[in-house]
Amino acid sequence: MKTLLPAFLAVVSLLPAQTTEPDPFLQWLDRIAQRQLDERERAMAQIRDRAAADRRREFVRGKLVELLGGLIDYNGPLNARTTGEIRADGYVVEKVIFESLPGFHVTGNLYRPSDPGRYPGVLVPIGHTQEGKPEGQLLSANLARKGFVALAYDPIGQGEREQHYLPQLGRTLTGGGGNEHLELGARSILLGQSVARYFINDARRGLDYLVSRPDVDPERLGVTGCSGGGCITTYIAAFDPRIKAAAPACYINTFRKLFPGPTADSEMSLPAFLASGLDIADFVELPAPLPWLLIATTEDYFTPEGARPVYEEARRFYGLYGAEDRVQFFVGQGPHGTPKDSREAIYAWLIRWLKDGKGDPADQPVKLYTNLELRVTKSGNVEEEPGSRKLYQIIHDEMKARLQPRSVDKLKAELRRLGVPSNGAAPSVQVREESTAEGYRVQQIAFESEPGIQLAAKLYLPGKPGRKPATLVVEEKRLPVPLFVQRSQSTAAIAEALARAGSVVLELDPRDSPAANEGRPFLGNWLTNERADLVGRSLPAMRAHDILRGVDLLAARPDVDPAAIRAYARGVKGFWLMLAAAMDSRLARLWLDRTPHTLRSSFEAPLTNHLFDVMIWSFARHWDFPDLLKAMEGRPVLWSDPANWMNQVVDAGPSFRYRYVSEAVDCYVEEFLK
């Protein structure tokens, strides 16, 4: 079906790059995830009566609200209006716009029967099609013809709500809604919340709009959506008691399958979700005995095999309430999306629970309208609406309101909790290859940072005898970067210059899953950061630990002066190095090159680059980069070319160093090694 193809392509773009090579770090994280899911399974096995089920639901709700950073409690005016309508065969499409938060506009198409009356209302959240609401028109038009009022609306970052929309280009700068969800998701986690709270609020306010209409019966509300829309369907059904029936499609799955496979973007993957003892089934069980139709398709990457365990567990859970029949499972024929048999199952489910079973569930042919015909705003983007605000501005305001500075002592306690320090023991080193260069040898080595984590590194060994200063260089490869962001150079030239100047150099590549990095604009390896976050581990903190294991290696070498160990990092990797230096005084001096000079400035900018690589839950609420320097207790830092969060050099004051065009690195190396 043509209307499903964009959704399929959009969600496929969220998947990790296909590879036949094993991914050791993903396997390591997956073992943690599976152990956490094992623990959850044992906890669920102890729930044998309704009282225990009620306690579980109370725990789940509290934990989910905590991970979301709280549900948004705003009930101000919707300021809703209709900008036009289309009269079709048996139904009318109204072009509507309302505010879910002040100045935060939601655009939608409302499908209602042509005949006057009072009808059940159905919210139709949309999946990851960049066009947004037109994806839902076939299903919504059929619902209208069957006696429902259906609201299909644009998600954040899609349709007429592109958050990084550039009028000069007539498109979003980031390349798509999924990318916008992720970039905004990293900001949210740094603030101690999930971007999902804004998606949930949009859905809640969509219900507010439906019940404000005289043609909608507020006691008969349902929700259905596919993929990303299936996720929001699940969320709003779990949290809003006004929903009386839910039918999420192509989303419901256990993280036993999702974690090593199609882990989805920020609003679909809550921080520390698995570490908190949760799985997707908890959303289904939370509003028991709400009627659920859980829909999968035969050829989806959110597989029926992954959906069935959720259905089976939820059905057992509902059995404690005598409501097994209120959870049903349907598998449609076809790829990711809502093929005809899935749509008919949705119609039948909503007719059963919202219309007393009275109606025909057969899918009917309807006229499909173009995106331009369904457009709500004149320009095609809410940016030009009076008083319009972007989500990054709302998050920035929340950051200022939630700011809660904490001491350096508490910073160090948090870094200890995150596992940054090493125990100081020298790791066992394997030399895999050796070569010679002018004045030094180069060894390709490997060593273990913690059980199951092997790191690759290069040792540059000057020929001069005796103990020498040492420098740890956080490796940077020459990688492609998005438009308008300067290409990063390899750190090999820095490592070679330091070795020629007489320093032992360890060029270290901290842990990663390179195959998961799709090279999407501005995001870096978001997927690996997100997976670590799901199991309650911070990838930046783990990388800081890797750096300190490199310091352990250098400090134990007979050719290294352990009192003269320095370190160099470029860009956001400087954050990992600052985390390490804050916890270990053996790092006597740092050189940060083109590293952003503050973390909180990332909230001020409309767009950031590689923010996932500094993503630690709630860190920006309590600390900033200057706090990490304070934790170093006066050890010197050479900070050259401080940058903003788009990797552009900025004037950050006289305490920083600035290069002129084509300035050689030698003088910096000499100064750094003094």
Image (cartoon, rainbow, N blue to C red):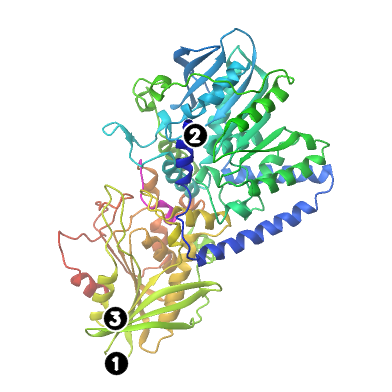
Which residue is tagged 1? Answer: 465
What is the magenta range? 606-614
- Element marked by disc 2: helix
Q: Is residue 613 magenta?
A: yes
Could you tell which of marks 1 and 2 lies nearer the N-terminus?
A: 2
Residue 504: x %, y % from top left: 32, 81
Q: Disc 2 marks which amino acid?
A: Leu
Which residue is tagged 3? Answer: 503
> Residue 4, labelled with which disc?
2
- Element marked by disc 3: loop
Residue 212 is left or right of residue 493, and the answer is right
Quadrant containing the C terminus is bottom left
Residue 624: x %, y % from top left: 42, 54
Q: For the residue carrying disc 1, how many other residues have a C-alpha within 10 Å: few (<14), some (14-19), or many (20+)?
A: few
- Element marked by disc 1: loop
The residue shown at (56%, 11%) is: 90
Q: Tell me where residue 241 sits by quadrant.
A: top right
Q: Disc 3 marks which amino acid?
A: Ser
**Gap between marks 1 and 2 measured at Cα:** 68 Å
Q: State whether residue 355 is above or below residue 541.
A: above
